[in-house]
Image (cartoon, grey):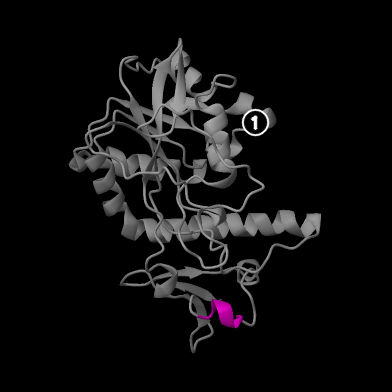
Amino acid sequence: MTKLILEYDFPHKNIDLTPNQTNLFPNPIPNNLSPYLNRNNDGDLVVTKKFFNGKAVDDVHRYDLKYCNGEWMLFEPRSNNLATLKPLSEKPSKHDRDITPNKAANNILIILESPHKDEYDDDNFLPLGPANGATGENFLNYFASPCMNIVLYKLIKDLHLNLDEGKVYSICFVNPVPFQTTLDFILRPIKSKKKDKKAEKTYRDQLKTEVWNALFYYCHHHFKCRVLSYNPSVIINACTKELKDKVKLAVDNPNNQIKCPNKFNTTHPSGWHGSNLSKTICTIW
């Protein structure tokens, strides 16, 4: 059985790959990927240190949440300009107005999972920022907006989240694992046939979960320290269901001293669209 070795930290974490997962990787490995992926003498696949060094996607304060004219709305941070987002048709890029979270602010932490394809520059594999692509667009459109204030409405009306209308809240995106656990940059392109594409997505999702779990072993302490340092007013756990409980356990560990009065779960923002909107689940943590 082929192993996937992650050279993130010592001891290196190994993942036993199924044949279908092994087939997700390019063979032979092209020259442009060789700095990030290679095979050792045993034939195992190695994700090298270069895939991780300098590739963490930092937490950001992206929006201010303010109560204006009888409703909650998202603004660019530290400004009176309503928040806007680049069209999905444009190439992913950095959000120019993203700033580092302020530990003294009224922080609402949106706990995502790990950065995906759109959170990196396709050409140079440089980190851009969290919640790009569909995740970012859905969040802006459906968390708190004049037309489709769905998620925040559920939190306030159904789960009794009490926000002070006289305060400004900082919306911060946080990835518990700040590295690309989907391995999109080094996996071969997805097959074009519909039947093959569906099966391959399943294999990729399974692999992503295994990589995330392996890296969270190393990253969970730093994640907890970051959450503690932000002194959050609200924490929203928006991880996918497979990983939501692991994040919850990490935050709720009594040794962490993380004291947050308002903690909730939601479905991941990538699913906040179309017919899925009515299925957007918000629950008490």
Asked whether 217 or 179 is in front, the reply is 179
Above-or-below relation of 236 to 120: above
Query: Can you give x and y, in whole percent of width and height, for residue 123 in the image?
Result: 57, 67
Residue 118 is inside the magenta segment: no
In the displayed structure, does residue 208 sit left or right of residue 219? right
Look at the image and tell me in which quarter the N terminus lies.
bottom right
When asked about the image quadrant of residue 247, the answer is: top left
Residue sitting farthest toward the bottom = 41
Q: Residue furthest top?
A: 70
Amino acid type shown at disc 1: Asn
Q: Residue furthest front?
A: 80
Q: In the figure, residue 280 lies in which quadrant?
A: top right
* Quarter of the rendering occupied by the C terminus: top left
Q: Is residue 226 above or below residue 187?
A: above
Q: Residue 21: x and y, percent? A: 61, 67
Determine the secondary structure under disc 1.
Answer: helix
Task: Give the residue at x 63% y 75%.
Answer: 26
Residue 254 drawn above or below residue 146: below
**Residue beneath disc 1:** 276
Q: Which residue is at 51% across, 42% downward?
A: 240
Q: Is 41 or 112 nearer to us in this picture?
A: 112
Q: Is residue 137 visible?
A: yes
- Image side of residue 102 versus residue 65, left or right: left
- Quadrant of the rendered image containing residue 25: bottom right
Give whichever of 176, 41 is nearer the camera. Answer: 176
x and y percentages locating residue 62 in the rendered image: 41, 39
Q: How many marks?
A: 1
Q: What range of the chain is rendered magenta?
A: 29-34
200 relative to 241 in the view: left or right: right
Front one among 209 and 108: 108
Q: Is residue 44 visible?
A: no
The answer to whether 33 is drawn above or below residue 143 in the figure is below
